[in-house]
Amino acid sequence: MTANNQGAFVLRDCALIAIATGQRAQNLKELRDILLGIHSGSLYFHFWGGLLQARFEEREYNNDFAAWARHSLHDTVLAERLSVVDPTELADLEALRQELINIVEQRLDEHESLTWTAPDQQFEFIRSQIVVFDTRRRVEQPEQLAVLLPTLSTGSVFYHFIDARRRSAAGLDDFRTWLGGFGTQYAALVERLAALDPYFVSLSELRAELAALFAAYFEVTSHE
């Protein structure tokens, strides 16, 4: 367990390893056909992997499918539809898979002919595997976490606030799970954490938002 009501919060770090699947799509129909059966870890990578990959430029689109639709298929309509898909609003990766298939099939119905990409611009499906590290840092009280949050690596932020939702049956991040172990004492903080959407910001921005939220909460409650 990463966190519970009887022990310390165990701070971990992580990295995503990219694994080639050998599957590629050269047009929208091929993309749809592969989406039907591709490993769910591939969907995870193409939506979340970019957050942990160092980039020299700002991401124009939040997922690889939208970027491919725009830059390889030159289909701005499809790119926009795919770009607004927020995986945090869907129950799980299978729900995300179905959402993608629905969008692609709708676009296929609207087109009379297929647009083919150049061989070097095919969509290459990559699967992710997460590697987790113990930072050897432990937090006994939420006030201590408020102090440490600004110093966390982006990998730690990803692991505890994003990947945790995939690991939790209730879809909760590790911070809310741990705070919930204190009963209703930090219910207001849990509610504020639940309102944060981690998908449309960078990990650095998410870390700043989390740090500000914790700092504001404990600054206010310390004066009550």
Image (cartoon, helix red, strand yellow):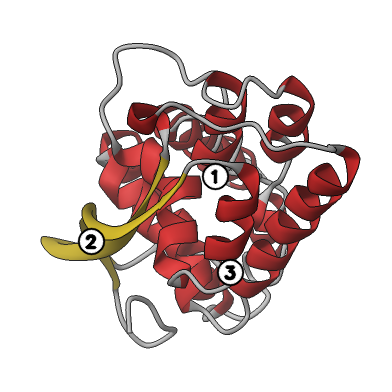
Which sits in the foreground, 47 or 208?
47
Horizontal side of residue 152 vs 210, given as left or right: left
In the displayed structure, 102 sits above or below 63; it is below
Give how far apart the Cα atoms at labels 1 and 3 are.
35 Å
Horizontal side of residue 176 vs 24, given as left or right: right
- Name the front one of labels 3 and 2: 3
Reading the image, the residue beneath label 2 is: 12
Which amino acid, mark 3? Leu
Can residue 78 be seen at all in this image of the molecule?
A: yes
Which amino acid, mark 1? Phe
User: Pointer 3: residues within 10 angstroms few (<14), some, or many (20+)?
Assistant: some
Reading the image, the residue beneath label 1 is: 218
Which sits in the foreground, 208 or 142?
208
Give how far apart the Cα atoms at labels 1 and 2 are.
23 Å
Residue 48: percent from the left, percent from the top? 45, 47
In the displayed structure, 37 sits above or below 67; it is below
**Which numbered disc, 3 or 2, marks the residue that appears first in the sequence?**
2
Please report the residue visible at 30 percent of the width from the left and 21 percent of the height from the top: 55
Reading the image, the residue beneath label 3 is: 93
